[in-house]
Amino acid sequence: MESIEPLVRHFLGIFFLMIGLQFGGRALGLYRRMSFSHINYGETGTAPWWHRQIFNVFRTLIVSVCVIRIFVDIDGWLGVFPALYQWPVLLVGMLLLLVSFTSVNYLQAYMHEDWRSGIDPREDGRNLLTEGPFARSRNPVFISVMTGQLAFFLALPSVFSLICLIAGVLVITRQAREEEKALARQFGSQYDHYRARVPRWF
């Protein structure tokens, strides 16, 4: 335990910091090239807007906590579960985070110019993806993100990460429904046929 615990502690801080930098850099690069934002909050007060706000709050908390833990022992404040805070569980969590990171990047690359974060109010120039990973699930990116949320709980089993997991899953499942409503409005019968043959999750 003594050998792997510092590794996982440093890994979490660096991992989530790099996730934030990568996401921000990707969004800025796309905006610079294509002259519109690929990150969409939705109208103030709507469900997608609240989902984004909640997601941002928890993302900021996770990054802050993981970076602080590298330098200061705050585990007593996080409500760590001693029974789960064992090296096999921490190792599985760390490996699952890498799996989630890889799959999210693969899926976003597969989507290419059709990738959006949130519901894009622009309805021109976007395709309905129904092949590849989208032939098996309507929301493979969300599945990968939720895998990462579970992985975070395993890499830092605590009350804090459990709250993050529950909140994250609730927000993502609600956002998936909102995005599917928007796709149904945009693509009409094409999306209805797709929805009839491909499950929302698995």
Image (cartoon, rainbow, N blue to C red):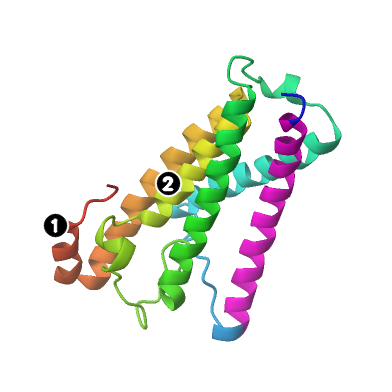
Which is more toward the observer, 162 or 3? 3
Q: Image check: 182 left or right of 89?
A: left
Name the residue at the front extreme: 3
Q: Is residue 64 visible?
A: no
Give the magenta-colored segment's residue range: 4-32
Write the residue at 27% across / 69% down. 131
Placement of 125 over or under 190, stated as above or below = below
Residue highlighted by disc 1: 196
Across and down, in percent, residue 12 comes to: 69, 42
Write the residue at 81% across / 27% down. 73
Count of number-bearing discs: 2
Q: CA separation, marks 1 and 2?
A: 21 Å
Placement of 112 over or under 103, stated as above or below = below
Q: Which mark is drawn over residue 184?
A: none
Which is more toward the observer, 111 or 119? 111
> Can you tell which quarter of the image residue 169 is in?
top left
Q: Secondary structure at mark 1?
A: helix
Across and down, in percent, residue 58 comes to: 60, 42
Residue highlighted by disc 2: 172
Nearer the observer, disc 1 or disc 2? 1
